[in-house]
Image (spheres, rainbow, N blue to C red):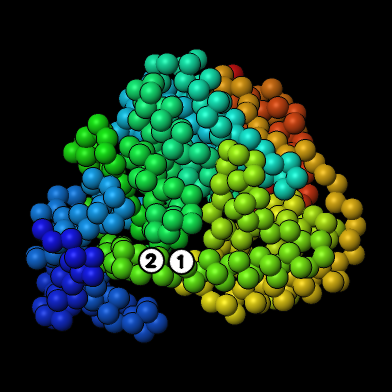
């Protein structure tokens, strides 16, 4: 087949079908949106005409033979992967598939403790047992970084029968570990490397960024094209590198939970996003990086704010940074990140990705506009000028690593009771407690809740930050194992 990246085989087939205007005596029942007029009026008729289900000539995602095969091959080629699969349940489904493809129930997997909740959930689904590697911390910024090769090596030596190593590239905050050396170390121990690249799709398309998983020689990676690759929300991809992992087995695992009615609207957006990345990705990212260099310079001129760049992180030796994540430390203006986020939304109509005690994080992307960044810079100038500059108490940045007394799957299936948060010390957690975003559990199922975790959760509640994972949305009560 030709690897002409300017083609979009799936999108072309769907467009052709829409133009044929065939009589739709099949599902979906809205029939080109006739049965959903109010929605059609807002989103437009084409979206509803593209909403197909197992239509002749368009190929089937779980057993493709024509245009989806072609589109996935183009996707693989773009990312220098040996094969690729479209996902329409986000990178969450990619993470599940990677773990279930390499670990059977009871197998160990080595992973960073600052993993996303999708990984913790995948442990329950797969029955794999985690061996956590603690990430490093940058206390000045108050953020968690990546893992070091030395810490990984210790984990490998102590757990030589583990079946896989998981890495995050980059973290929600944009920090990357030295993935190439992680891959080398894990492969030396005979273990495949699975990479959560939910926030790193674009990194493959410009050499200024840290290496992508496929460039670093990883075995398999899940990329959220919908986050930073330009496609629509929920659409991601699974990439298999030059690896001993069998793509057919991966496909079998993927199909365990793949819907039989995937959205062609999402799938087509992947096809078009891949074309754009392959044909114009570098050029778009060049412009974005230039815009970001200017933005950081402007932000760093504002007294009390600090927007670190790649060099800042690389000076530590172990880590690098994806500069499309515009991380801004606000502690010195005497406001918490949560307070600045609230002001940005309330007073300036600006939405950012996340906030923590000391930072805000704006995520920039392929569709960036200078005026968006100007609006942020102007708002921050205003906020910093009027800030009372009270002293923000510095709390030591921690990555909790609670004792695991029961494996995640066993804890999930154990009887639980709900008790007040303040009585939870020493109990085994029956659910996750996390700030979302970034969605990294402070405590997960089967882990012991410590007084420090309770104190930290109480502090977060006081700061009115969004906590998730617990059955009680206010986290006054927590489900613990009924012992
Ligand atoms: C680090 C990380 N991994 C995985 C995911 C899951 O990705 P998705 O939302 O595409 O399912 C997220 C989502 O935010 C994430 O932040």
| Above/below status of 422 relative to 80 | above
Closer to the camera, 411 or 61? Answer: 61
Mark 2 touching mark 1, by CB under 8 A?
yes
Q: Can residue 361 be seen in this view?
A: yes
Q: Where is residue 158 in the image (x, y as percent from the top left)?
A: 50, 15
Closer to the camera, 472 or 438? Answer: 438
- At 22% from the left and 58% from the top, the residue drawn is 74
Q: Quadrant of the N terminus?
A: bottom left
For label 2, the crowd category at 10 Å Cα-Cα, with few meaning under 14, some 14 to 19 and many 20 or more, is: many
| Above/below status of 279 relative to 234 | below
| Above/below status of 115 relative to 150 | below
Q: Which residue lies furthest to the bottom in this view?
A: 41
Residue at mark 2 = 281
Residue at mark 1 = 285
Numbered disc 1: secondary structure: helix
Tell me which corner region of the image, top left, top right, bottom left or bottom right, holds residue 24. bottom left
Numbered disc 2: secondary structure: helix
Alpha-carbon distance for marks 2 and 1?
A: 6 Å
| Apparent side of residue 44 relative to residue 302 in the rendered image (left or right) | left
- At 23% from the left and 70% from the top, the residue drawn is 6
């Amino acid at each position: 087949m030709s690897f002409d990246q300017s083609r979009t085989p799936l999108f072309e087939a769907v467009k052709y079908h829409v133009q044929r205007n065939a009589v739709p005596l099949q599902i979906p029942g809205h029939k080109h949106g006739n049965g959903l007029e109010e929605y059609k009026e807002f989103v437009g008729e084409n979206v509803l005409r593209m909403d197909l289900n197992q239509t002749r000539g368009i190929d089937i995602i779980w057993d493709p033979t024509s245009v989806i095969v072609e589109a996935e091959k183009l996707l693989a080629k773009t990312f220098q992967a040996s094969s690729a699969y479209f996902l329409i349940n986000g990178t969450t489904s990619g993470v599940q598939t990677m773990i279930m493809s390499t670990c059977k129930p009871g197998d160990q997997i080595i992973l960073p403790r600052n993993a996303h909740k999708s990984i913790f959930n995948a442990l329950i689904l797969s029955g794999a047992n985690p061996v956590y590697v603690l990430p490093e911390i940058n206390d000045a910024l108050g953020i968690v970084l990546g893992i070091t090769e030395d810490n990984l090596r210790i984990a490998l030596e102590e757990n030589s029968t583990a079946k896989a190593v998981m890495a995050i590239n980059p973290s929600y905050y944009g920090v990357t570990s030295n993935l190439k050396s992680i891959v080398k170390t894990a492969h030396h121990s005979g273990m495949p490397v699975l990479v959560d690249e939910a926030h790193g799709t674009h990194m493959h398309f410009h050499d200024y960024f840290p290496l992508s998983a496929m460039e670093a020689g990883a075995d398999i990676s899940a990329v959220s094209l919908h986050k930073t690759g330009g496609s629509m929300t929920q659409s991601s991809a699974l990439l298999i590198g030059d690896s001993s992992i069998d793509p057919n087995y991966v496909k079998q695992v993927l199909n365990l939970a793949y819907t039989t009615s995937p959205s062609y609207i999402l799938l087509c957006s992947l096809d078009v996003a891949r074309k754009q990345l392959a044909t114009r990705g570098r050029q778009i990212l060049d412009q974005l990086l230039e815009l970001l260099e200017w933005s950081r310079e402007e932000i760093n001129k504002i007294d009390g704010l600090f927007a670190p760049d790649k060099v800042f992180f690389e000076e530590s030796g172990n880590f690098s940074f994806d500069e499309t994540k515009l991380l801004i430390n606000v502690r010195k203006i005497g406001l918490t990140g949560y307070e600045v986020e609230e002001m940005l939304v309330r007073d300036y109509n600006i939405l950012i990705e996340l906030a923590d005690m000391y930072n805000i994080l704006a995520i920039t992307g392929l569709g960036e506009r200078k005026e968006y960044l100007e609006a942020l810079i102007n708002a921050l100038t205003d906020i910093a000028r009027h800030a009372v500059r009270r002293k923000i108490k510095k709390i030591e940045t921690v990555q909790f690593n609670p004792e695991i007394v029961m494996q995640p799957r066993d804890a999930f299936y154990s009887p639980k009771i709900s008790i007040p948060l303040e009585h939870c010390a020493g109990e085994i957690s029956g659910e996750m407690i996390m700030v979302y975003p970034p969605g990294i559990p402070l405590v997960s199922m089967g882990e012991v809740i410590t007084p420090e975790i309770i104190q930290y959760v109480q502090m977060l509640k006081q700061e009115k930050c969004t906590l998730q994972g617990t059955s009680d949305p206010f986290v006054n009560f927590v489900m613990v194992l009924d012992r």
